[in-house]
Amino acid sequence: MEEVETPIPGADETRVRVRAAAFNRRDVFITQGLYPGIDLPRTLGSDGAGETEDGRAVVIDPMLEWGDDPRVWSPQASILGMPRDGTFAQYVVVPRDNVYAKPAHLTLEEAAALPLAGLTAYRAVVTRGDLRAGETILIPGIGGGVQTFALLFAKALGARAIVTSGSDVKLERARALGADVTINYGANPDWHKALKRGEVDIVVDSSGGDTLGKVLGVLRPGGRVVIYGGTRLDSTFRIFPLFWNHLDIRGTSMGSPADFRGMLDLVNLHEIHPAVDRVYAMDAVNDAIAQMAQSEQFGKIVLTIP
Ligand SMILES: NC(=O)c1ccc[n+]([C@@H]2O[C@H](COP(=O)([O-])OP(=O)(O)OC[C@H]3O[C@@H](n4cnc5c(N)ncnc54)[C@H](OP(=O)(O)O)[C@@H]3O)[C@@H](O)[C@H]2O)c1
């Protein structure tokens, strides 16, 4: 930690006094040098909640310059916290349009857990996934920050949710959030065989590796897979179920301003509380990153800013 100049907002920008921030996998990847376009020195942090100069409690949308096309981001798009200074600081300057009223039912710490993961999950489940009430969604690796939101949103929308994890403790926590069926993939490499062929309407995944190959066989004809990450890198899969069952594989990343507003509306309407695993004080920031690197968390790790 070090002292830096308090940032000065430019035209169409505003300065937020950050009270709480939260971690995403990209913060870990950046500290390990494993992220495109690293430009140092830089204050990390994409997620934040706090107060504007005129005293409004706000959350920050970390998606910068999405552009005019709701289907895809613009070539200028970037994410708060790299290459632009982020929220692991007392003050952050962002475009005025990127601040939104904090949901009234959330504490500042809960609100800080919302932005990046909530936005990504909303676009994956709702905008790209088009999840309908009564459908069955499969959410592999439920411990991840985005996946916990995918579960919360799917249940709010009236879906049946099947989740997997390598940890029974995380599966227990997922049941408390409404998961209908839980499967431990660590104990059984053929975990997908516990599901009936055609039982699943939609899969939302970021685990990568062999997950895609396994889930294609359990999707109903006309089902879809939405992918926003590849924690265990690339996949190979059988082509046959893809074409024979008219399946869709859809990619997504972050979300548009309309997605962010839709996410906040859903959170407000259903008074959804993010799954916050643990709250660290700012001076323990390195302990927080170490915990995140081990993937021990269920949901989000939050940082309070003094
Ligand atoms: N494109 C975007 O806009 C975007 C946005 C956010 C994140 N991401 C990417 O999405 C990924 C997840 O990020 P995150 O921050 O939400 O979570 P994270 O903390 O990186 O979560 C990783 C999760 O992956 C799961 N996992 C590991 N091995 C698995 C396996 N064999 N099968 C199924 N799941 C497995 C684990 O779940 P269990 O512990 O439950 O087993 C773990 O909780 C990262 O790769 C990140 O870069 C992309």
Image: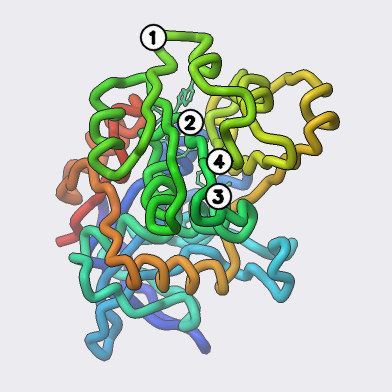
Disc 4 on helix, strand or loop? strand
**Viewed as shown, does residue 144 lie left or right of 210?**
left
Read off the residue under disc 4: 204
Q: Report the amino acid beneath label 2.
A: Pro
Mark-to-mark CA distance, 4 and 3: 31 Å
Q: Quadrant of residue 76?
A: bottom right
Asked if the residues shown at circle 3 and circle 1 are in contact, with their CB atoms under 8 angstroms apart, the answer is no
Most foreground residue, 140 or 35: 140
Q: Residue placed at 69% from the left, 62% from the top?
A: 73
Figure quadrant of residue 184: top left
Q: For mark 1, does the 10 Å Cα neighbourhood hold few (<14), some (14 to 19), or many (20 or more) residues?
A: few
Q: How is the image coloured?
A: rainbow
Q: In terms of depth relative to the viewer, which is nearer, 281 or 151?
A: 151
What mark, if any, has residue 39 been given in the picture?
Answer: 3
Residue marked by disc 1? 187
Measured from the top left, where is residue 81 in percent x and y? 46, 56
- Circle 1: residue type: Ala
